[in-house]
Image (cartoon, rainbow, N blue to C red):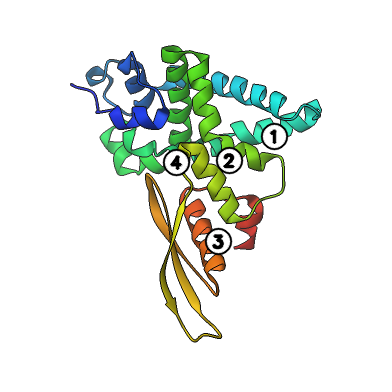
């Protein structure tokens, strides 16, 4: 059986694999018929990728905050490597469609399960490390964790700022806002705004001003990615 076309995923990862079988292994869920998929699933690479992530994040925090003590660094570290954050990074990457699942897990919505997304994302990091070395894996992590790191050491930022940091960390391009409609009387207008980012479903928001509608749209996109701070979730 031939493997999937991974050329688009190479671009998202920022690395073209010399050993494509490593990446295919990282994407292979245990529910697959192993006789048809080379006998390997992502679990061994997940084990390795978890350690790679820990090393990259701890090194980045050490460099980023030279005045922080061990306790403060540990709090930020635990936030950044927890499975929920790894799953959020996988959503930001758009990893779900590339996961290789058995038919039963596919029917159960496995591509959207946080545990599977986190496992596969860690396995991909392990594959990047084996194929390209630590520098390649580090580049990937710093690219997709940039927004999470910026938010891990301070109070929650407004949705537009948070979304911009996340999206620019992903591909260097900021999200794009467009006014779709302006309704209502002059003294009480209602703006509808759409926000777009490459590879992510557009989201809409409404508000009494363009700025308010843009914030609502940004919050909707963050929610669709599963990325909202605790304070933002409580405010809903």
Is the C-beta separation of discs 1 and 2 under 8 Å? no
Q: Quadrant of residue 58?
A: top right
Left or right, 63 with respect to 120, comes to right
Cα–Cα gap, marks 1 and 2: 13 Å
Sequence-wise first label, 1 or 2? 1
Q: Find disc 2 in the rendering and name its residue.
A: 147
Sequence-wise first label, 1 or 4? 1
- Give the numbered dot on residue 1: none
Cα–Cα gap, marks 2 and 4: 13 Å
Element type at mark 3: helix
Sequence-wise first label, 2 or 4? 4
Cα–Cα gap, marks 2 and 3: 17 Å
Q: Find disc 4 in the rendering and name its residue.
A: 91
Q: Find disc 1 in the rendering and name its residue.
A: 76
Is the C-beta separation of discs 3 and 4 under 8 Å? no
Is the C-beta separation of discs 2 and 3 under 8 Å? no
Q: Find disc 3 in the rendering and name its residue.
A: 215
């Amino acid at each position: 059986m031939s493997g999937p076309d991974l050329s688009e995923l190479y671009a998202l990862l920022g690395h073209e694999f010399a050993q494509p079988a490593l990446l295919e292994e990282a994407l292979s869920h245990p529910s697959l018929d192993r006789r048809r998929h080379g006998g390997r699933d992502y679990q061994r690479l997940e084990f390795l990728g978890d350690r790679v992530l820990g090393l990259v994040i701890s090194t980045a925090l050490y460099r980023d905050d030279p005045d922080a003590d061990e306790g403060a660094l540990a709090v930020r570290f635990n936030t950044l490597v927890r499975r929920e954050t790894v799953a959020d990074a996988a959503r930001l990457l758009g990893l779900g469609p590339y996961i290789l699942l058995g038919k039963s897990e596919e029917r159960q919505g496995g591509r959207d399960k946080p545990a599977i997304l986190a496992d596969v994302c860690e396995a991909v990091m392990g594959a990047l490390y084996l194929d390209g070395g630590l520098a390649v894996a580090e580049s990937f992590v710093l690219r997709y964790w940039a927004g999470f790191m910026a938010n891990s050491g301070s109070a929650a930022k407004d949705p537009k700022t948070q979304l911009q940091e996340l999206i620019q960390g992903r591909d260097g391009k900021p999200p794009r806002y467009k006014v779709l409609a302006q309704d209502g009387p002059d003294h009480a207008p209602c703006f509808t705004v759409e926000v777009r980012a490459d590879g992510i479903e557009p989201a809409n928001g409404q508000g009494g001003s363009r700025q308010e509608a843009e914030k609502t749209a940004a919050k909707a996109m963050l929610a669709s990615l599963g990325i909202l701070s605790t304070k933002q979730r409580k405010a809903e």
